[in-house]
Image (cartoon, rainbow, N blue to C red):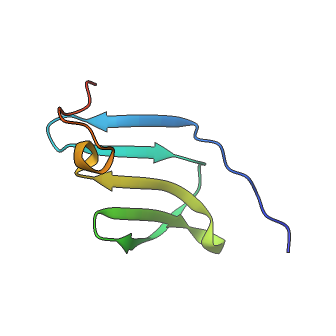
Amino acid sequence: MAQTQLKPTKITYDKQADALYIYLQKGVFAMNKEVEEGVILDVGKNNKLLGIEVLNASARLGLKKPVKA
């Protein structure tokens, strides 16, 4: 089975929510899948991974202060 390597097209950070979002590819949104508490995958049609949301990003990235946007 061949694997597709995805490269982030855009990364955003919401300082107020302390949430990081990694955009991987465009597509029609179908569902969310929480793979770990606070890590949510946005999945499109045909199971295409569209993006990844990371909640409580500062703590998950090991930062003492929130990321500056």
Image vertical order of residue 18 relative to residue 50, above or below: above
34 over 69 or under it: above or below: below
Q: Position of residue 16 (x, y in %)?
A: 14, 37
Residue drawn at 29 percent across, 43 percent down: 62
Q: Name the residue: 20% across, 34% down.
A: 66
Residue 20, percent from left and from top = 34, 44
Q: In the displayed structure, would residue 3 be above or below residue 64?
A: below
Q: Looking at the rendering, in which quadrant would you find the N terminus?
A: bottom right
Among all residues in the image, which is located at the extreme left?
Answer: 16
Q: Residue at x 60, y 48 (%)?
A: 25
Asked if residue 54 lies left or right of residue 26, the reply is left
Write down the quadrant of residue 63 in the picture: top left
The residue at the far right in this view is 1
Please tell me which residue lies in front, 31 or 20: 20
Picture quarter containing residue 34?
Answer: bottom left
Q: How many marks?
A: 0
Quarter of the image with the C terminus is: top left
The picture quadrant where one finds residue 45 is bottom right
Q: Is residue 1 left or right of residue 15?
A: right
In front: 43, or 34? Answer: 34
Horizontal placement of 35 versus 26: left or right? left
Q: Nearer the viewer, residue 23 or 38?
A: 38
Q: Residue at x 23, y 48 (%)?
A: 59
Where residue 28 sits: x, y (%)? 55, 60
Locate residue 29, reporting x and y percent: 49, 63
